[in-house]
Image: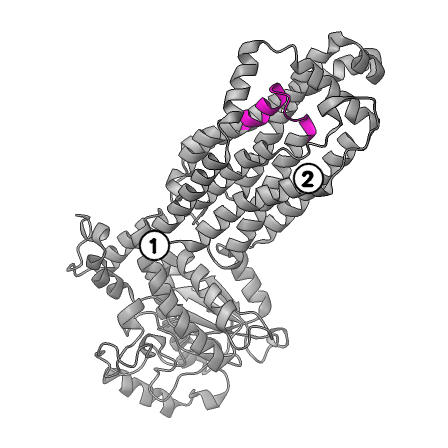
Amino acid sequence: MVNSAWRNSAVEGSSSNSAEIGHISIDVHGDDCPCGNVGCLENYAGPSALVRQAPAMPDLARRPALDPAADDFLTEFARIAAAANAGDPEARGLVERSARYLGHAAVTVAVLFDLDAIVLAGQGFAVAGSIHQAVLQRELDRRLFARKAHPVRVVPSVNGSDAAAVGGAVDVEDQVRFFATGRRCRRRRVSGATNRCSHSSRGRRRTNAVSADRSDHPGRGRGVRSDVCPPEWGNAPGDRLRRRHRRAAGAGSLHDGPPIAGGGVGVATEEQADRRSERVAAPIRPRRWAVVAVAASGVAALVYVLAVWTVGGQELENAALRGADQADAAQAGEAWRALDEITVYSLAAAVVLIALVGVLRRRWDLAVAAVGVVVLGQVVVQGLKRFVLVRPPLVEVAGDYTHNSLPSGHTAIAMTVLFAAVIVAPHRWRGVVVLLLLPWAVGIGQYTLTAKWHRLSDTLAADAIALALAALASWWLARRGGLHRYEGPRRVGRVVIGAFAGVSAVVGLALGGVLWGVPLARVGLAGVVRDHDYEWNTYLGAGSFASAGSLIAALVFLISWRRLAT
């Protein structure tokens, strides 16, 4: 239920039923509503509506815990929301469809009242608020008339499911104060944010906000009000008496005066909205992935400059390649077999499998993003290696050593497949995906050195490019509202995997530093690259750095997705 507020006062309407969003018609040929209208939003997007729709979903209908005929529909809705938050495709599709219906109505209300914020309050939003927040924000960003003039933020209420109770308590307090002092103008809580009186000089910065209560009961959610000092808002005794008579007849609000938040739309200052956003779960901002993409691109460029365009870089990497000749036949054979398994056909099969997961989850955006990471990874890597980047002849070499091989195509395939699988996999399976693919992806980078297919810089640059593309895909998903916060318990297995990967990365960096640093400190760069005794250590150090680079790239991406689900 939604009531409107404008210019620091709530709009009550003649019967205290202003801006009832639950009875906005979204289908002129829809079902009849008890209110007398047809196609009301409440019949399609309310918690009880979702519970009634659940039996049509085969997997949900077979669950013994779900009882569509139960009197307590909020408990049944909470079960559906929990399944949606855990990644169940049918439950999530059901909740997202409800959120899209609500988004249609939210656009209408935002256009009518030129809102700056929409606050989600009530028991329904308390259990599925992150999904609704993402979908509503996407609908407003895409369809709102005034989106270019100013943004409309969707934020959860700090009162959550207690909004109605808080509103009723505040209303009682305000009634007592009015009869005791004859004054109603005071600081008030609006959906969890302080609202200053319109007479206060510090309260003149205003923003229009709507607070939607997710309940199917016309009496729930009324409560917290903005300040109502001006007499034209019905503070006269006669107005109070008329409202009391309307309530006795069953019409209007549960409290005296203009309703607003728990089930109402309120007005809050910009400072108040900022404080509220800090206290609740903030929307997922894509900026983090933009920063990761830029940083990873910078790392790839730096690796290319230091390793390819300096004499010392070329000499060290060539020494590592010569050191790979000392690897035994078993190691070299294993590396060749692993690399030979990556073919055009195996890559195509991986792409099809990744796309299929997205399709089965009914998430075309995930399929596009994940497949895009893998395909663009090869387009970028092969384009850079074959047509853009060159390897200047700074040192005397012969044969394959003269060709540019940066970045590594095999490493790029392994890392982009890993990142794509993380993107498209349900949250509950993400740990399994990382456990299976991360060792393989790290091993491919190491094998390219052992088989002498690539240099260390080739592997590091491929890691960075794959990370940049995965970050861009994540940025795109976040921009369109395809991600939401995971509200379930912490998964210990993932913490263990992440900790082990982090320790392994640190050990790899330390080992590589020792294997390179000690000889360089003893005989200098010239001695290391000319003395064959140090080539084996140089190769081992390069392998350690390659493994650490792949682990760090994977950890950065996984950290950016921490507590996020699709």
Residue 432 lies, with reference to residue 384, above or below; the image says: above
Residue 511 lies, with reference to residue 108, above or below; the image says: above
Q: Where does label 1 land, which residue?
A: 92
Tell me where residue 336 appears, x and y as whole percent: 54, 21
Magenta stretch contains residue 276: no
Left/right placement of residue 48 relative to residue 156 reads: left
Left/right placement of residue 436 relative to residue 445 reads: left
Q: Amino acid at mark 2?
A: Arg
Near-viewer residue (326 or 313): 326
Q: For the point 82% across and 29% down, which residue is it?
A: 393
The N terminus: image quadrant: bottom left
Q: Which residues are magenta?
A: 442-457
Tell me where residue 551 appears, x and y as whole percent: 57, 30
Residue 386: mark in rendering: 2
Instruction: Give the color scheme: rainbow, by chain, secondary structure or one colour.
Output: one colour
SS at mark 2 in the image: helix
